[in-house]
Image (cartoon, helix red, strand yellow):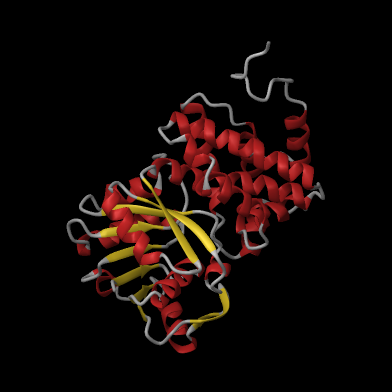
């Protein structure tokens, strides 16, 4: 049994806290928002983000960051990606040498092009940083529906320790050494999911969705492999698996935001209606910059950026994608 601090009381942090508590661990949830802490302690339910799922009385909910970190066997960092660096900076004075931090958010910092684990390590060099990713919507994990994810860590010892801590009869956990690939797959799929949502909002069909998913993973893989990720990762749970669920699920905030934009709403109107951080919007510019830096063709990412930040209509973007120069699907395959 471990003593665990979960930093971030949103839907994903709360769902993982429930999972860990059911696994027999002592769990503390921290939130920066005092009103949120008061509400959760009073109602023992996150009515807006995880409705209908009760938080057991055994889980401590606090606004005190130091008490949520000190003495914990490992920490789960579950704040939205735009707040990863600032939260890590606040955590740093309390994190001991070698203390494990499992990042469970997904994103890339636009200014530095760092992944989230790199940001955490930059602010907390003494930490042992791991990641958890895969097709895993909080709404389903919180309800105990079968889910499979991947833990990425620098050492097999850390990965297997976390695997044992998180694994249950409804939450299967694989391990991987490819932290870079896991994080890139998890971050970039949010950008593709915006495009998939836009297509749905415009009334396009299954053919369009399948094409976006397939060509989307091609873009993600091309960039990810050039950046040091492994091809196996992009064909697995944290690559194509996570992309499928985020492009197709009614729980996906990125797909929902894209859907609203496909219906004619502006980016800001869509984000306001979703009422949660739409991480694909924050990762889109970084993805475009990485594509240019590594000289990788990313036409879907390019069009999403034009829609988000340059005023291009989703319909025009689709037309431009469809009318690109004809080419072979896999240029590496030889002809007779």
Which residue is pictured at 30% across the width and 75% down the height? Answer: 64
Q: Residue 151's spot in the image, x, y percent?
A: 40, 54
Q: Which residue is depicted at the point 61% across and 53% down?
A: 246
Q: Which residue is farthest left?
A: 97
The spot of residue 329 in percent (x, y) is 67, 25
| Residue drawn at x 77%, y 26% as measured from the top left | 323
Side of 231 where 206 appears, left or right: right
Residue depicted at x 73% and y 36%: 317
In the rendered view, tell whether residue 177 sits above or below residue 257.
Answer: above
Question: Residue 20 at what x, y percent from top left?
Answer: 39, 72
Tell me if I can see residue 87 in this picture.
Answer: no
- Where the C terminus falls, by quadrant? top right
Q: How many marks?
A: 0
Residue 77 visible to the viewer: yes
In the picture shown, does residue 330 fall above or below 203?
A: above
Residue at the extreme top of the image, as rendered: 336
- Please name whichever residue, 191 or 1, is drawn nearer the observer in this view of the structure: 1
Q: Is residue 215 left or right of residue 285?
A: right
Between 287 and 157, which is closer to the camera in this rendering? Answer: 157
- The spot of residue 296 in percent (x, y) is 53, 26
Quadrant containing the N terminus is bottom left
């Amino acid at each position: 049994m471990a003593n665990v601090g979960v930093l971030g009381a949103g839907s994903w942090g709360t769902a993982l806290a429930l999972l860990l508590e059911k696994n027999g661990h002592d769990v503390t949830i921290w939130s920066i928002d005092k009103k949120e802490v008061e509400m959760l302690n009073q109602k023992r339910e996150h009515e807006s983000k995880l409705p209908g799922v009760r938080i057991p009385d055994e889980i401590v909910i606090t606004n005190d960051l130091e008490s949520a970190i000190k003495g914990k066997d490992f920490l789960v960092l579950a704040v939205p990606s735009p707040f990863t660096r600032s939260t890590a900076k606040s955590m740093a004075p309390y994190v001991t040498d070698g203390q494990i931090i499992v990042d469970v958010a997904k994103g890339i910092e636009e200014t530095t092009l760092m992944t989230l684990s790199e940001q955490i390590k930059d602010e907390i060099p003494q930490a042992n940083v791991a990641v958890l990713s895969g097709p895993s919507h909080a709404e389903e994990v919180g309800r105990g529906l079968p889910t499979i994810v991947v833990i990425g860590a620098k050492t097999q010892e850390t990965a297997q320790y976390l695997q044992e801590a998180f694994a249950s009869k409804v939450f299967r956990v694989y391990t991987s050494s490819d932290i870079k690939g896991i994080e890139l797959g998890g971050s970039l799929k949010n950008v593709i999911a915006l495009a998939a949502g836009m297509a749905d909002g415009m009334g396009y069909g299954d053919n369009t969705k399948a094409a976006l998913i397939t060509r989307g993973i091609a873009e993600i893989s091309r960039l990810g492999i050039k950046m040091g990720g492994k091809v196996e990762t992009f064909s697995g749970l944290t690559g194509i698996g996570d992309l499928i669920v985020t492009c197709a699920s009614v729980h996906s905030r990125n797909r929902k935001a894209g859907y609203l934009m496909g219906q004619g709403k502006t980016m800001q109107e869509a984000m306001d209606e979703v009422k949660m951080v739409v991480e694909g919007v924050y990762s889109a510019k970084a993805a475009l910059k990485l594509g240019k830096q590594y000289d990788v063709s990313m036409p879907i990412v390019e069009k999403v950026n034009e829609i988000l930040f340059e005023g291009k209509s989703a319909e025009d973007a689709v037309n431009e994608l469809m009318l690109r120069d004809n080419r072979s699907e896999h240029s590496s395959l030889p002809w007779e």
